[in-house]
Structures are given as structure tokens and as C-alpha cells.
Amino acid sequence: MERYKALMIMDLRHAWKDPVLMAAMFGPLLLLFLSRFGFPVAVNWLNVNYSFHLEPYRGFAASLLIVTIPMLTGMLTGLLILDERDENVIAYYAVTPLMRKGYLLYRVTLPFLLCTVLSILYLSFSTLSDIHWAKLGVLLLLASEAPIFSLFLAAFSANKVEGLALSKIGGLFIAGPVVANFVPGAWQVLGAWLPTYWPAKVPYLITQNEPMLAIVFFSVGLLLHAAYLYFMVSVFNNRQS
């Protein structure tokens, strides 16, 4: 436990000195602030100036913003991994009592827990979401996406510069909520491969009074997230070998 505590302290010091990592760390809190205070202002402004009613899209706005939390936390930890790879620190950890498995466990657990805490804060205080029991399922899917995105950057980037570029491409994953809320019928299969599709689709089905279908989509989404995580861990381990 002390070894993990030392790693966390090092991560905090590293993130504090890097503006990009700082932005990834405080970005979810900014999203919470914008959701709680900015959305009502946007609703009133659009209604007064353009007679556009934004209120019916409250659920979509919540899902669109909340799926960025695992992306931001995943980017934070993914870039930390790339920094450690550039400095050849990962090879050092492999020969310490922590070993490679302990290091990987920490790097998967940290974004999972960080995303869980930040997502709970968002769902509790943003005032945009009212999902009730389905929040637990959405939380699990969102938290699973953080280590997936983290290892995605670490597995497919040679260094931190490539990681930053890949994180911008990964921003396309935000299309998941768009597909879940607006794409008709069978065409939704086009977005089903995106991890962000599933935590957006579950609350959408709840609002449509389809609780059993929401459970089915949650189950399929959870299996897909587990498969993605297993694949990313495998690719990361092969790269480190």
C-alpha cells in the first residue's frame, strides 16, 4: 500500500507542474460548473433571442458532457504513463517489489477510481441528470472507460507528443451520445462500437420508459467495455515486453 501511495504522490507532483495534465485534472470540475450554472443561462438566452427551447435536450447535454470525464481522466493517466516510458521509469518499476503487474494494476485502478468520484459529483450536482437507479450502471460504464482510454494512449503512442495527438483524435468518441440520442433505428449500430455510446444509451432508454431494454443495453455495454479493457491491457503488455 505504501508503494501505491508513493506513486500517487509522484503523480500529483508531476501533474501540478504540467499545464496539460492540470487541465485534464480540473476539466471535469469545470464541466460540472458549466452544467450547473451555464445550462440555465443558455436555456434562457436561446429562448429569448431565438425562440429555441433547449430544455428538452437536457438529458442529451448531460450525456454529452459526462462522457468527457473518463476521456479527461484517461488522458491524464495515459500521459503520465507516456512520461514514465520516456524516462524509462516503467522498466525500473518492473524490477522493484511493485513489479510490472503491480504497476499496471495501479495504472488501471487510478483512472477508474478518479473517474468514479468525478462522475458521482457530476451526476449529483450538475442538475442536468435525473436517472435514479440507472446511475449505478452508468457510473460503472463511465469508470471502465477511463482506464480503456488511458491504455489506448499508452499502447498506441510512442511518446507523449504522439499521445497528445492521439488524445485529440480520441475526442471523436464524443460522437457516442449523438448516435444514442439522434440516429434512427438500425443505423445506431454505427455508433455501438464506441464505448461512449453505451453510458449515453442507457439513460436515454430510461427516459423513454424502457427499463428492461436499458438493462439489456447495460449488460451488452459492460461486456464490450470488459473486452476493450482486456484488449488494451494485452496490447500495452506486449509493447512493454
Image: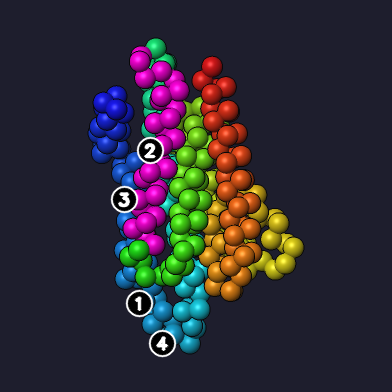
Secondary structure state at the residue bearing disc 2: helix
Of the numbered discs 4 and 2, the one sitting upstream in the chain is 4
Q: Which residue is mark 3?
A: 26
Q: Is residue 64 visible?
A: yes
Percent x, y for residue 143?
45, 47
Eye-nearest disc, 2 or 3 = 2
Q: What amino acid is labelled 3 in the image?
A: Phe
Q: Which residue is mark 4?
A: 48
Secondary structure state at the residue bearing disc 1: helix
Of the numbered discs 3 and 1, the one sitting upstream in the chain is 3
Q: Is residue 79 left or right of residue 185?
A: left
Q: Judge the density around disc 1: few (<14), some (14-19), many (≥20) Cα neighbours within 10 Å.
A: few
Depth order, front residue of 149/19:
149
Q: What amino acid is labelled 1 in the image?
A: Val
Percent x, y for residue 214?
59, 63
Give the magenta part as a residue range: 96-123
| Residue at point 65%, 54% (across, down) | 192
| Residue at point 50%, 56% (across, down) | 137
Label 2, label 3: how many angstroms apart (C-alpha)? 16 Å
Q: Main secondary structure of the magenta part?
A: helix
Label 2 with label 1: CB-CB less than 8 Å: no
Q: Is residue 5 left or right of residue 62?
A: left
Percent x, y for residue 107?
41, 32
Q: Which residue is mark 1?
A: 41
Secondary structure state at the residue bearing disc 3: helix
| Residue at point 62%, 65% (across, down) | 212
Of the numbered discs 2 and 3, the one sitting upstream in the chain is 3
Give the numbered dot on residue 110.
Answer: 2
Where, quadrant-wise, is the N terminus in this rendering? top left
Of the numbered discs 4 and 3, the one sitting upstream in the chain is 3
Q: What amino acid is labelled 4 in the image?
A: Val
